[in-house]
Amino acid sequence: MNESDLPVTDFHPYRWGDPARRTTLPAAATETLAAFGVKAPAEEPVDLAELTLPEPGFDLAPITGVVGAGQLRTDAATRIGHTRGWSTPDLLRLRAGDLTDAPDAVAYPGSHDEVVALLACCERLGVAVVPYSGGTSVVGGLAPDRAGFAGVLALDLGRLDAVLAVDTVSRTATLQAGLRGSEAERLLREQGLTLGHFPQSYEGASIGGYAAARSAGQSSAGYGRFDEMVVALELATPRGTVSMGTAPKSAAGPDLRQLVLGSEGTLGVITSVTVRVRPLPAERVFEGWQFDSFEAGAAALRRLAQDGPLPTVLRLSDEAETSINLADPAAMFAGGPGGCLAVTGYEGSAAEVAARRAAASEVLAAAGGQPLGEEPGESWRHGRFKAPYLRDPLLDAGVLIETLETVTFWSKLSELRAAVTTALTDALTAQGTPPLVLCHISHVYETGASLYFSVACAQTEDPVAQWQQAKAAANRAIRATGAAITHHHGVGTDHRAGYAEEVGPLAIEALRAVKRVLDPAGILNPGVLFESGSSEGDH
Amino acid sequence: MNESDLPVTDFHPYRWGDPARRTTLPAAATETLAAFGVKAPAEEPVDLAELTLPEPGFDLAPITGVVGAGQLRTDAATRIGHTRGWSTPDLLRLRAGDLTDAPDAVAYPGSHDEVVALLACCERLGVAVVPYSGGTSVVGGLAPDRAGFAGVLALDLGRLDAVLAVDTVSRTATLQAGLRGSEAERLLREQGLTLGHFPQSYEGASIGGYAAARSAGQSSAGYGRFDEMVVALELATPRGTVSMGTAPKSAAGPDLRQLVLGSEGTLGVITSVTVRVRPLPAERVFEGWQFDSFEAGAAALRRLAQDGPLPTVLRLSDEAETSINLADPAAMFAGGPGGCLAVTGYEGSAAEVAARRAAASEVLAAAGGQPLGEEPGESWRHGRFKAPYLRDPLLDAGVLIETLETVTFWSKLSELRAAVTTALTDALTAQGTPPLVLCHISHVYETGASLYFSVACAQTEDPVAQWQQAKAAANRAIRATGAAITHHHGVGTDHRAGYAEEVGPLAIEALRAVKRVLDPAGILNPGVLFESGSSEGDH
């Protein structure tokens, strides 16, 4: 990419994804929504082109001195395009014209060294920095606290989009942080390789974001979580560069890679990662299984997770989600197969897929599963990146729709599902908007599994506050059962309180101490992961 | 265990393991050794019973106030039994009567809360604390730097030896830190479960040590490393308790468990861990394969590690190690099968073992392996805990024998093996004692593998200094190829300099910052992992 060819995000600031793939609601959905009392909002979303922003509150010259004048933008469209992420409250705020979190300027560094220099420069200027690559955070990870700073600089890593190295013997690839997941996959495919990482944000999210937020993709059963793929990384900090990862695993002290993975831009800016890659699978088969109940299906998934063989993709929808068929807009609300739908996917060589599929199918059948053939599996596979496109027409129609996720040990899974479902239902019903709450398992481990909830109800007049109440109730339920506050969305600002409660004050103090070493002025994503205010006073 | 029934270590302070299993050298070995110029040392090892130690340099009353008078010992035998670990230099120093690292006293806390109280007490007294459970460190992890402290208290966790909980649904067990690995395995076996963790120190090492030093066992291909088994842990610090692990995996911030695992007692005392357990395997098969060269064998292991199926145990000895048959004292130096011996082991259900063995055997044969049948595999399995027993008669005979290990990516493995072998050979030859250098791969990953070296040569008059020179040369070679300074032995004090070089000054500063939060007075294992002196001045 040459310098004049700046990366342009194809994403509309409050409408998901490729404009050509935007969708409308099917008729069946509109009818169902009416029964929930859904009415179109009183106000249309604002036209962002009509909004203006104040001039940047700090001297830009030192920044252009680092990146060059062509690589710094302060126009409103660019700044609005870098405002917050993709949670429903983020979109609702932008629809309402709330630009309070817009960065003052957006810089596009072209190298790791420019990132290091930019951070030193922002430290001198007293400017907060939000590392920005895919921009797909759904937990407020891109809305730093600007209190005490001269302004906020969004550091767009889009120009750091190269595959730096491929080691075919060790099966690793070194990828720059600004590379979108989909583009990384395309470039690796040219060499017969795959990362195998497919989160729902795959079309937009970046390698750096995957790493900073401990992403988990839909094929995590087969390919692992992103934090399990990373063998090395480069971190740019205001105090210089930290390189981590001399070997796959070692006993050379704590695994400090795992301290950076999940640090969400607060300890430094990850500029590249070296990840384990695999050969492109020769064969891919997806299929559906039906279980009488969520508990029966969960028990079957647990058997596969604990005794194997593990499919590459393994998911289970509860009765409500199964009946709605969320993944397929065309079929949504048109009625599902009944019971609970499990999706299994197998990738690998033809012989390996055949053997694994046969053995897993035996386990699923023995656990009470009814095979539904390949159609439901392929339908899920083709529809899996479509769900985010549904949110925009649903919001337009006056639906409040959002998701949240958590993870626990197998023995607590039923209790967790019941507690969160009840909390969401009660909190929204109390506001006069009884919700539909859907749940699925999308990631399994030997000792536990994740739960992913989708919630839909009629919007009240203040849908942001409406959701915040429901979300707070869900968080309390999650914490009360001892589960983790997030499985793969991350902490951001939305989960900060729950996270602090989960890890306790000494752990937060330890993280702050690490931040003080790497980022003494606290300019990096302040307020994300933990509160920024008291970092000076706690020691 | 009642209070009067203190745990007694069966290990002689400088002779390995169960006295009933001690061994002598076979005749073939004695002949070979003579050819290397080995002569019995001029001095016999000291009789430890004749040594005395100075009185403890601090007030013991506050400590007995916490644990009770019966749980504090200051007699010489107990203190000598808690002096240093099991590296060859450790044994040589003890043989020479060097007790400079002996703790002033040994306390036996009976609960997590007592550990917390002891740490607070030692902080007030200005006493350094060395957490001690198995006592099997081979990297100086039990020899804290006492400079600036009133003395050293060894905190023997032997009374914390319970299985606190077993969750058969989630397949986890909560084990106290002082439980020896072998005893944990025995207790789990009663419930039909196994940890599957078998490091060579298995007879003596403890659960807490496995966790604190990121242990890897001989079945790591099948059961994973110990740090991969831990889902939760309790850490006692001078500032209180930190509990970690609410789920198998999450995106709730950095994985802080991985900051404690490998912290080697410097950030707190791990008092219990919750680990993933598995059902006892119904079937176990071990077998041998012969490869023409180490490179051919390594390529075969790489294929299994990358494309599967992975055996439970997977090892490859180089030509020298194969010829010596180190694992079997009876056969040692009696000549091996020639070429390079690989050992494969399979554990699981009968059907699963049969399928995995057949598929892996096909891969090994296609990669040029010749099947040697079950005898070499079973011979390795039965002999695998015997090698440490050989060291004592070898030291008695005047042999300097020691091991070291490292890990790198597959593409650098040959270079690493050559560099370390050359470094050890040159450094010892230059001292007039040309060595035998043996090497094997014992742990494989998709992206790389470990290398384990055994070195033997005639002792000089100062064998500790002799080894230090060789070890320093090996460390330089490891660092020059970019490999990790240790794969599973840990950092301790022996690898401190190489570790600092490997992770760089900012990472060390970050670790020190975490230590200052959890251990403000720096009493916990000072000098282990990183130098203790400058911790106040670096911020």
Image (cartoon, coloured by chain):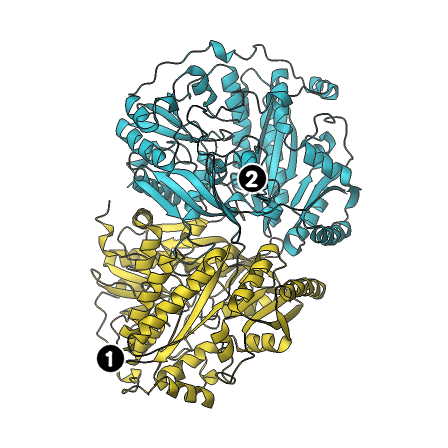
Chain colours: A yellow, B cyan
- Please indicate whether residue B269 sits to the left or right of residue B424 in the image: left
Q: Position of residue B327 (x, y in %)?
A: 68, 31
**Against A31, is A483 above or below?**
above
Q: Name which residue lies at 77% across and 46% down.
A: B369
Residue that mark 2 sits on: B406
**Residue B133 or residue B529, whichever sits in front:** B133
**Against A500, is A462 above or below?**
below
Residue that mark 1 sits on: A52
Disc 2 element: strand
Q: Position of residue A159 (x, y in %)?
A: 43, 67
Q: Position of residue B519 (x, y in %)?
A: 32, 37
Neighbour class for label 1 at 10 Å: few (<14), some, many (≥20)? few
Neighbour class for label 2 at 10 Å: few (<14), some, many (≥20)? many
Q: Position of residue A523 (x, y in %)?
A: 28, 57
- Give the Cα distance between marks 2 and 1: 58 Å
**Against A445, is A297 above or below?**
below
**Residue A77 or residue B87, whichever sits in front:** B87
- Residue B449 in view here: no
Which amino acid does the dot numbered 2 rest on? Thr
Q: Name which residue lies at 55% across and 45% down.
A: B225
Which chain contains the residue that carries disc 2?
A: B
Disc 1 element: loop
Which chain contains the residue that carries disc 1?
A: A
- Please indicate whether residue B33 sits to the left or right of residue A227 in the image: right
Which amino acid does the dot numbered 1 rest on? Thr
